[in-house]
């Protein structure tokens, strides 16, 4: 981490150059791969932020999609309604600043990139507030209960959105201003990685790890475990919100269904596959798990699977539903992946076994 | 007077709904009692119980033609009872075996690992069961063929109770009595109770912990299967995702009663059922699903041990 | 006379069980005090009470005349009380070095923002902490293990690491919960010397729970004896050794 700041700066510069020269032709001619690239970036942000909460701090949150939803809808609202309203308020036909600007011939307009930055930060901020609201009551619960409560809160957020007509309810909300590009997506990803790694690799950040390892001992060493848990939660929620914002301003349309429990599970699988507590691991896992479903979907559309199915059915003499469905159903694969991972390699790709060390039988109750 | 009737009607509906939650909640609470683990996949066992019943009923129809019965009377009672009994029993046995299989394959190898690992596995099992069922059966709701004729029972004045609701309540009472007998009067039941207090001592006393744990899973799964059949009798459509919402509500019921406490699970289930129907009956149907989540958050924040639960202090 | 720690008629009840009853205890500065008693007497409960894990049902605890009741454990550690545990509770995913460095968190001046901006102040404090942590490890002859995972240390070294970690919080009072458990006689002698040494060097008081009488009688200036939560004796080692109530508690009638 010695040259972290330098590395980040270099990366951002490279990214900027890419955005300037390569992005436009790339997105036009290779739009399918461009989409995948953006999704990789968004998933990296989600996985890295959840890893701070689940992996480094050991708090099992199953509601990450809820914060993503807050960010998505916040950014959507901003870019569609709030942002233009504020511009109008300031510089519209009867705006506050208009009398000042008009004689000077100054037009107040916000460029695409600035607009994206503002709405994404807004989404992140609101998500962070939601993280605070959810985290403070929830974080005195341990293990299983915390998981259930975070799941519950994720569903509550989704149900709230479902019932708010202004946000489009079940119809969904369309977002004007689809300005997400590679620069901002991977820029935020880089920032997320920098923040998580920078926090954790310091004496301050070691506090997160102690909360994961042994809360009682951590408190005895003067570490305010509640504060650490809340901070991890809020930072995680912030970046989940930015991911949601970027997503909303990429697809141009969001629905509550896209942020349900299964979406949370998506991110959890990335964190577990990557290895809880390894940022590099979850980045790799995010990339893999973004590409893999696409690969499988491509495979599903070839003749390979139907041919396999016909020969299989002739052997076992039972008619099966189209097996392509298995390949395209992410959830079947992910659930199998979860089970197999837990049974064979719970530390994931890059994690350490400390998180899965052997324990003695549960203590007798007093 | 009308107010009283309305109240009693909702109470009746609530008891019927609550009985379902109670049956499912028992599975959660018993497994938590012996393993300190939330079996995320339990709701899907309930769903598979309904589907198994669906399958058995379809088979039986070729023999029994249950739709010929229009009412429950002295003549029709026995064949209806027999057929329904076969469906229930078959489904309960199927799910009991399924529950034991899941425990052996997915949970037992992880008995020494942190509970988080098993929780994640349980999530995986739940998703797998749901989605594999959906793969084979399709996402469309399947119509469950009628087992008992669903009619309003006469003679209660302005109160309406459907035969299916009566069946639910009666069956639940019978199953509760059976469960109590098993838990209180048999050696396995005693072992279950002992295991929930001190597993280490149990194995030192010669109890086969593995067997008792499997038995617990079998019991809980059988009860969930019964719930699935009873629900299908009442609202005859089954879908692969039908276990999600009742599953989480039943879990809340178990926590409300004090997770690990069998009586608590029943009380919790009935309370949640009644609360839901009251809220719906008094004009707020959109809040119905939120009740369970609201209750969950309130209990976990203010009295995590629930109504009847024990405080478990971590030994420092 | 103002003592460092004053436990004033503390009682703690768990439901129907009275774990500690009417405990009066004072510890002055630079004192080495022992707390002994048969198993289940409530010694660890006393520790847990002093460090804020449990709240006394009755009574008060004072550190330098400041009342500690109701404070959370990390606040009590911030005021100068550190402890080790009966069953080793090291941070298992961390190395030896990081276990000690984690305990410097308490006196950290640079917060999360500095961790992100990584300026000069941050780097200076980090290297300062590294130095202090290394010095501590050297005193205990553990610096050669600095990058070893703490769970891979031999048992005796793990116990000593716990003490190092507690010392990193710069306490005025150190509570040691059975530090000699599982050690052989040679290790125990070394431990006795070590405890006396750290008491001198760091200018702290030590409250020691131990079962090994040789250790307790050897280094403690005063001893409290607990049985079933009650204080049955208090005084210098020679008095305790001869006290009939103490003998009865340990050996039975």
Image (spheres, helix red, strand yellow):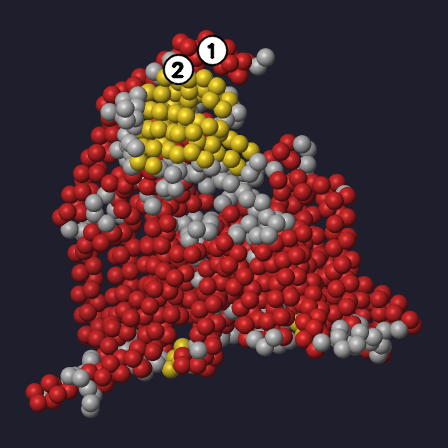
Q: Chain of mark 2?
A: C
Q: Image height check: is B168 above or below C157?
A: below
**Number of numbered callouts drawn:** 2
Check chain identity for marks 1 and 2: say if they share one: yes
Which one is earlier in the sequence, the residue at label 1 or at label 2? 2
Which secondary structure lies at badge 1? Answer: loop
User: Label 1, on which residue?
Assistant: C243
Figure quadrant of residue A244: bottom left
User: Picture quarter containing residue C162?
Assistant: top left
Q: Report x, y in % for residue B262.
A: 66, 51
Side (left or right) of A337 relative to A254:
right
Left or right position of A242 against A292 = left
Q: Residue furthest right?
A: B75
- Observer-nearest of A172 and A19: A172
Look at 43% across and 38% down and name the residue there: C55
| Residue that sits furthest to the left in the current view | A104
In the picture, the disc for residue C235 is 2
Q: Residues within 10 Å of mark 1 (few under 14, many from 20)?
A: some
Is residue B51 visible to us here? no
Task: Please report, as a chain letter, where disc 1 is located.
Answer: C
Toward which corner of the image does residue C252 lie, by quadrant?
A: top right
Is there a contact, CB below 8 Å, between mark 1 and mark 2?
yes
> In the image, residue A202 lies at what x, y percent?
25, 46
Q: Residue A83, position in %: x, y?
A: 27, 79
Please tell me the numbered disc located at residue C189. Answer: none
Few, some or many residues within 10 Å of mark 2 (<14, 14–19, 20+): some
In the rendered view of the protein, which quadrant contains the C terminus of chain A? Answer: top right
């Amino acid at each position: 981490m010695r040259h972290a700041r330098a590395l980040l700066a270099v990366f951002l510069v490279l990214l900027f150059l890419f955005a300037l020269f390569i992005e436009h032709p790339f997105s036009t001619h290779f739009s399918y791969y461009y989409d995948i690239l953006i999704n990789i970036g968004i998933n990296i942000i989600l996985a890295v932020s959840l890893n701070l909460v689940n992996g480094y701090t050991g708090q099992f949150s199953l509601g990450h999609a809820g914060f993503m939803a807050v960010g998505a809808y916040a950014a959507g609202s901003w870019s569609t309604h709030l942002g233009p309203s504020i511009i109008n308020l300031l510089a519209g036909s009867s705006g506050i600043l208009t009398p000042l600007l008009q004689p000077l011939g100054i037009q107040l307009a916000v460029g695409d990139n600035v607009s994206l930055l503002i709405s994404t930060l807004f989404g992140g901020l609101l998500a962070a507030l939601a993280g605070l609201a959810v985290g403070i009551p929830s974080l005195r619960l341990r293990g299983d209960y915390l998981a259930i409560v975070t799941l519950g809160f994720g569903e509550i957020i989704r149900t709230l959105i479902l019932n708010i007509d202004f946000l489009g309810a079940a119809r969904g909300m369309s977002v004007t201003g689809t300005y997400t590009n590679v620069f901002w997506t991977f820029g935020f990803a880089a920032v997320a990685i920098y923040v998580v790694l920078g926090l954790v690799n310091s004496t301050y950040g070691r506090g997160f790890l102690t909360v994961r390892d042994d809360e009682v001992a951590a408190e005895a060493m003067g570490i305010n475990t509640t504060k650490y848990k809340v901070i991890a939660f809020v930072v995680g929620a912030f970046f989940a919100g930015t991911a949601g914002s970027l997503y909303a301003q990429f697809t141009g349309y969001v629905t509550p269904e896209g942020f349900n429990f299964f979406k949370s599970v998506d991110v959890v699988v990335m964190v577990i596959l990557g290895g809880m507590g390894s940022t590099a691991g979850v980045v790799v896992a995010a990339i893999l798990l973004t590409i893999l479903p696409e690969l499988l979907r491509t495979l599903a559309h070839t003749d390979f699977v139907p041919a396999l199915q016909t020969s299989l059915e002739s052997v076992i003499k039972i008619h099966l539903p189209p097996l392509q469905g298995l390949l395209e159903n992410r959830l079947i694969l992910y659930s199998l992946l979860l089970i197999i991972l837990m049974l064979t390699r719970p530390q994931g790709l890059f994690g350490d076994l400390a998180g899965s060390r052997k324990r003695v039988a549960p203590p007798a109750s007093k | 007077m009308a107010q009283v009737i309305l109240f009693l009607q909702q109470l009746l509906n609530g008891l019927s709904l609550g009985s379902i939650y109670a049956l499912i909640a028992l599975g959660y609470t018993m497994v938590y009692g012996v393993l300190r683990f939330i079996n995320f996949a339990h709701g899907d066992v309930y769903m598979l119980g309904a589907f198994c019943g669906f399958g058995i009923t379809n088979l039986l129809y070729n023999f029994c033609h249950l739709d010929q019965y229009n009412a429950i009377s002295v003549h029709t009672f026995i064949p209806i009872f027999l057929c329904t009994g076969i469906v229930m029993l078959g489904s309960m046995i199927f799910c009991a075996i399924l529950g034991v299989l899941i425990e052996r394959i997915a949970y037992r190898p992880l008995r020494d690992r942190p509970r988080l690992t098993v929780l994640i596995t349980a999530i995986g099992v739940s998703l797998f069961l749901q989605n594999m069922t959906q793969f084979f059966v399709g996402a469309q709701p399947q119509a469950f063929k009628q087992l008992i004729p669903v009619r309003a029972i006469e003679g209660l004045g302005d109160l309406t109770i459907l035969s299916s609701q009566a069946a639910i309540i009666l069956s639940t009472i019978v199953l509760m009595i059976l469960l109590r007998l098993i838990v209180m009067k048999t050696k396995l039941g005693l072992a279950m109770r002992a295991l929930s207090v001190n597993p280490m001592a149990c194995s030192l006393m010669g109890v086969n912990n593995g067997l008792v744990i499997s038995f617990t899973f079998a019991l809980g799964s059988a009860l969930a299967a019964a719930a699935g059949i009873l629900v299908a009798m009442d609202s005859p459509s089954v879908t692969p995702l039908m276990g999600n919402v009742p599953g989480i509500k039943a879990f809340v019921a178990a926590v409300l009663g004090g997770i690990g406490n069998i009586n608590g699970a029943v009380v919790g289930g009935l309370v949640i059922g009644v609360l839901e129907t009251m809220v719906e009956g008094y004009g707020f149907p959109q809040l119905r699903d939120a009740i369970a989540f609201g209750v969950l958050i309130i209990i976990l924040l203010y009295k995590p041990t629930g109504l009847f639960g024990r405080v478990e202090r971590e030994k420092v | 006379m103002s003592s460092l720690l004053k436990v004033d008629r503390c009682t703690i009840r768990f439901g129907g069980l009275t774990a500690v009853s009417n405990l009066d205890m004072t510890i002055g500065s630079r004192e080495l005090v022992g707390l002994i008693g048969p198993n289940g007497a409530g010694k660890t409960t006393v520790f847990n009470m002093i460090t804020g894990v449990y709240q006394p049902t009755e009574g008060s605890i004072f550190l330098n005349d400041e009342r500690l009741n109701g404070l959370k454990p990390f606040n009590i550690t911030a005021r100068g009380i550190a402890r080790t545990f009966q069953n080793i509770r090291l941070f298992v995913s961390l190395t030896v070095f990081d276990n000690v460095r984690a305990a410097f968190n308490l006196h950290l001046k640079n917060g999360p923002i500095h961790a992100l901006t990584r300026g000069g102040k941050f780097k200076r404090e980090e290297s300062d902490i590294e130095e202090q942590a290394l010095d501590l490890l050297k005193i205990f002859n553990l610096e050669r293990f600095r990058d070893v995972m703490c769970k891979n240390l031999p048992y005796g070294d793990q116990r000593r690491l716990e003490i190092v970690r507690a010392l990193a919080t710069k306490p005025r009072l150190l509570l040691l919960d059975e530090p000699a458990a599982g050690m052989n006689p040679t290790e125990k002698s070394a431990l006795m010397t070590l405890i006396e040494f750290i008491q001198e060097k760091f200018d702290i008081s030590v409250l020691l729970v131990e079962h090994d009488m040789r250790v307790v009688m050897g280094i403690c200036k005063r001893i409290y004896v607990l049985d079933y939560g009650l204080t049955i004796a208090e005084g210098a080692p020679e008095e305790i050794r001869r006290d009939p109530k103490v003998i009865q508690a340990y050996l039975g009638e």
